Image (cartoon, rainbow, N blue to C red):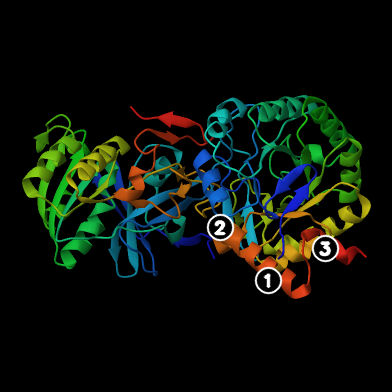
């Protein structure tokens, strides 16, 4: 039954002043890249990628941006939320050398993905980017999983510049077999174009405004009717190339087109 | 050789499976995908005068024997929706524009726009059970339904199909009013007003508390409505509610429907549901010696 299970928050970690992780009991199998719908009673129900996968427990990681995440930000251990999932398809880690590129809160789903890759014996290169030093998170965890390169837009930590620019250089230096990314869509679109040009395998986790998360309402569709909640949120290079709206526009709650940039 | 083509008023369909309104009918891409999956026609999401965000989530959950939803009529508005319609030229099956308004003037305006955009027919949402001032609140009065249909028919020359509700009064009275207003067919039924209370939260699970119940659980109600409407009206009836398999579709046609709409089954069966229903129905027709839909349509009424 695709219906929220009501659970109590087990643990809360403050990743930085703006980002928190909430741990909840979760007994089903979930893959990195898959997501859950988190119900904040009386407020909203929002999609959240899984950011840590442990025995009988998962976390999701979020930034305070709206009503729902604002309320979540104020919640305490023992508070009640709803969760349904796992939903959608996770990352498929192919090849031997994988470059992970995370921008902003897009860093979150890459932690369990890089963990899985390491476990599978792959060689990880990880680029994480944020606007400024304070907005970075998962730095310590990521360091343990591979070669870590940090970028900030203002140069307050790591290299100064956009994650996509740094990643492009890293792609040419490190020659990965695959790029796995999550973050701002324009960043992912640039990485897609780079990987198409250089013939590198690629997967991206795409974000769209989501309503039913049952594959019915069509709110989260991209391209030729691909449902981010069902066929996504992780898509391959060959699929995304054909989505003429990827990196061009998203849709607001009413379904109107909202152009990037 | 059996032929599963069907006619609804002047609309010719390659098969009797139609995508129901509110399911994947908001973007040009999703409509193209459904057409390529074998549907006989598509109904768009219900479109109104202005952009509407709908309700916060949860807007839809799976419950016993179906889906409970209260989307709240989210839509980009009729002006913006033109962008989607402009991109569906390659779709070679009928596309039916669903509209909702607060009165006959809005309905007539929206219908005219949909006709100008090039759509093949109009479905009037007179039955959405969860939006204040719209849908069911208009569609439960035979007088208002007659007036809305009449005004819309004055404005457009494409077929007009009001979608009726089984939530209020006698659906046959509403159906007759629609026929008197000049409707070219009726669609029955919209989702049923329903509620799910979560026993852990001790509150209704949907943000809007009340929603519309669709899927298998409402099929017997819908089949009864289609049966009664087919018996009492001279215009075509399109059946909708819990159509998941070819057996369901055959049952509706035996009750008098000339086509069926499919919604919740996209969740239960995936997008292959249209083609699967058609294949099963063809086999059943062969086994029973029926060459066309008309050969067995309404047989249960006799």
Cα distance between the residues tagged 3 and 2: 52 Å
Same chain under badges 3 and 2? The reply is yes
Nearest-to-viewer mark from 2 and 1: 1
Which residue has dot 1 on it?
B283
Image quarter in which the N terminus of chain A is found: bottom right
Which comes sooner in the sequence, label 3 or label 2?
2
Cα distance between the residues tagged 2 and 1: 48 Å
Cα distance between the residues tagged 1 and 3: 15 Å
Please count the marks in the image: 3
Whole-percent x, y for residue B149 in the image: 83, 34
User: The numbered mark 1 sits on a residue in which chain?
Assistant: B
Query: SS at mark 2?
Result: loop
Q: Quadrant of residue A129?
A: top left
Whole-percent x, y for residue A55 in the image: 30, 70
Whole-percent x, y for residue B64 in the image: 64, 66
Nearest-to-viewer mark from 3 and 2: 3
Q: Residue at x 63, y 39 (%)?
A: B73
> On the rendered structure, is A59 left or right of B177?
left
Same chain under badges 2 and 1? The reply is yes
Instruction: State whether residue B221 appears in this view.
Output: no
User: The numbered mark 2 sits on a residue in which chain?
Assistant: B
Which residue has dot 3 on it?
B295
Q: Residue at x 22, y 38 (%)?
A: A135
Which comes sooner in the sequence, label 1 or label 3?
1
Q: Residue at x 36, y 49 (%)?
A: A239
Labels 2 and 1 touching (C-beta < 8 A): no
Image quarter in which the C terminus of chain A is found: top left
Q: Residues within 10 Å of mark 1 (few under 14, many from 20)?
A: some
Q: Residue furthest left?
A: A173
Query: SS at mark 3?
Result: helix
Q: Residue at x 74, y 69 (%)?
A: B285
Which disc, if any, is residue B201?
Answer: 2
């Amino acid at each position: 039954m695709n219906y929220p299970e009501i659970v109590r928050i087990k643990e809360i970690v403050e990743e930085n002043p703006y980002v928190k992780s909430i741990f909840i009991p979760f007994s089903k199998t979930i893959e990195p890249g898959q997501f859950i719908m988190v119900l904040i009673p009386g407020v909203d129900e929002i999609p959240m990628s899984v950011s840590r996968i442990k025995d009988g427990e998962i976390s999701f990681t979020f930034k305070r941006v709206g009503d729902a995440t604002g309320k979540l930000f104020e919640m305490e251990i023992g508070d009640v939320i709803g969760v349904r999932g796992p939903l959608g398809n996770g990352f498929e880690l192919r090849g031997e050398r994988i470059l992970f590129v995370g921008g902003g809160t897009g860093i979150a789903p890459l932690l369990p993905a890089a963990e899985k890759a390491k476990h599978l014996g792959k060689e990880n290169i990880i680029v994480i980017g944020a606007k400024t030093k304070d907005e970075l998170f998962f730095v310590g965890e990521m360091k343990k999983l591979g070669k870590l390169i940090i970028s900030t837009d203002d140069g307050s930590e790591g290299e100064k510049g956009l994650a996509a620019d740094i990643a492009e250089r890293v792609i040419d230096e490190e020659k990965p077999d695959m790029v796995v990314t999550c973050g701002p869509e324009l960043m992912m679109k640039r990485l897609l174009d780079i990987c198409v040009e250089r013939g590198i395998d690629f997967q991206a986790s795409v974000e769209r405004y989501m309503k039913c998360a049952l594959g019915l309402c069509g709110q989260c569709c991209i391209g030729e009717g691909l449902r981010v909640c069902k066929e996504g949120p992780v898509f391959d290079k060959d699929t995304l190339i054909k989505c003429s709206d990827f990196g061009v526009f998203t849709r607001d709650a009413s379904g109107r087109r909202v152009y990037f940039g | 050789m059996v032929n599963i083509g069907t006619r609804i008023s002047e609309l010719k369909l390659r098969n009797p499976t139609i995508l129901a309104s509110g399911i994947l009918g908001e973007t040009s891409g999703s409509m193209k995908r459904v057409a390529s999956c074998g549907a006989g026609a598509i109904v768009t999401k219900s479109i109104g005068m202005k952009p509407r965000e709908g309700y916060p989530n949860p807007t839809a959950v799976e419950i016993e024997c179906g889906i409970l939803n209260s989307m709240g009529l989210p839509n980009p508005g009729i002006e913006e929706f033109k962008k989607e319609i402009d991109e569906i030229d390659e779709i070679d099956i009928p596309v039916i524009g669903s509209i909702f308004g607060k009165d006959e003037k809005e309905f007539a305006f929206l219908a005219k726009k949909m006709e100008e955009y090039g759509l093949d027919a109009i479905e009037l949402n007179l039955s959405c059970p969860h939006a204040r001032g719209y849908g069911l609140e208009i569609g439960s009065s035979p007088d208002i339904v007659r007036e809305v249909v009449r005004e819309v028919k004055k404005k457009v020359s494409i077929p007009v199909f009001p979608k009726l509700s089984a939530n209020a009064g006698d659906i046959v009275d509403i159906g007759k009013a629609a026929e008197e207003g000049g409707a070219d067919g009726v669609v029955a039924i919209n989702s049923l007003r329903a509620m799910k209370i979560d026993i852990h939260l001790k509150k209704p699970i949907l943000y809007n508390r009340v929603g519309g119940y669709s899927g298998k659980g409402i099929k017997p109600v819908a089949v009864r409505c289609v049966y009664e409407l087919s018996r009492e009206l001279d215009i075509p009836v399109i059946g909708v509610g819990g159509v998941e398999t070819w057996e369901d579709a055959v049952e509706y046609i035996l009750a008098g429907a000339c086509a069926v709409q499919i919604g919740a089954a996209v969740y239960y069966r995936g997008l292959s549901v249209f083609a699967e229903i058609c294949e099963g129905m063809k086999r059943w027709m062969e086994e029973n010696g029926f060459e066309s839909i008309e050969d067995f349509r309404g047989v249960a009424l006799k």
